[in-house]
Amino acid sequence: MTERISIITPAYKAEPFIAEAIRSVQAQDHLDWEMLIVDDGSPDNTADVVAGLAEADSRIRLIRQKNSGPAMARQRALEAAQGRYIAFLDADDYWLPGKLSRQLAFMREHGAAVSFTRFRRISSDGRKQGRLIAIPERLSYRQLLGNTAIATSTAMVDRTLTGPFSMKKTYYDDFALWLDLLKRGFVAHGLQEDLMRYRVVGKSVSRNKGKSAKMVWRTYREVERLGAVYAGWCFANYAVRAFLKYRYF
């Protein structure tokens, strides 16, 4: 396993945004990376856009699969990843310059197995930018159970420290992964810098708050096997933090 950063990007109907995500990676000052983009059976031209950019940059790899959902797309990319570090970037988000180098230095300084950063939301067309989202300095497993702080496109994992991991085929596969890693005794470290833009797309999975709430509850009960009372306490904390996080754009 090299010191390379492997970037995991599931893509489904991402034609309008995927080029911007890729260019934000190419603009990084840390150059030792590979970007594994899994086209999850998109009916549009997502794969063609990626293929065109990959032809000019060998660090970009297009993987195609039948539509199986983001969890299995991320898992497919993980299986092909060669880097020591795994960074996640969703197809409709993008990074700010310096994201990889600053986060990598931060992780080395703190001996962090898992890290995440601050970010801002943007509108679908990119014209409206939201407030800077606050994050805690550290998150343990129990703290994460009642928190919404780790945005997927800000997260980075050191596989040398964590050992192998995989995605669960569940609605909130990213949340389930952070819980799995922190349950092993690791702490997620929050880098207090604004390094990502999270695009708010009207019909995206994460915008369905009713379904999201239901699936968070299922994660507590079916994945984490929490008792009803403790799951209820965690859910109440999660809901309050989510409300405070999303009440303003």
Image (cartoon, helix red, strand yellow):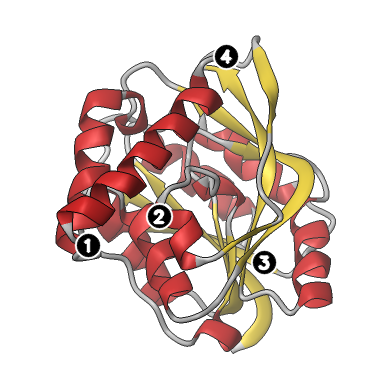
Quadrant that contains the N terminus:
bottom right
**Nearer to the camera, 44 or 246:** 246
Q: Nearer the viewer, mark 3 or mark 1?
A: 1
Point out the tag, 3 or 1, that comes first from the N-terminus. 3
In space, the residues marked 4 and 3 are separated at their CA atoms by 35 Å
In the depicted structure, whether residue 218 falls above or below residue 242: below
Q: Secondary structure at mark 2?
A: helix
| Residue corresponding to mark 2 | 145
Q: Secondary structure at mark 3?
A: strand
| Residue corresponding to mark 3 | 33
Point out the tag, 4 or 3, that comes first from the N-terminus. 3
Point out the tag, 2 or 3, that comes first from the N-terminus. 3
The quarter of the picture where residue 30 lies is bottom right
Where residue 76 sits: x, y (%)? 32, 66
**Residue at x 50% of width, y 80% of height:** 185
In space, the residues marked 2 and 4 are separated at their CA atoms by 23 Å
Amino acid type indicated by mark 3: Trp
How packed mark 4 is, by other alpha carbons closer than 10 Å (few <14, some 14-19, many 20 or more), is few
Q: Nearer the viewer, mark 2 or mark 4?
A: 2
How packed mark 1 is, by other alpha carbons closer than 10 Å (few <14, some 14-19, many 20 or more), is some
Amino acid type indicated by mark 1: Leu
| Residue corresponding to mark 1 | 226
In the image, which disc is placed on residue 248? 4
Left or right position of 87 against 103: left
In the image, which disc is placed on residue 121? none
In space, the residues marked 3 and 1 are separated at their CA atoms by 38 Å
Amino acid type indicated by mark 4: Tyr
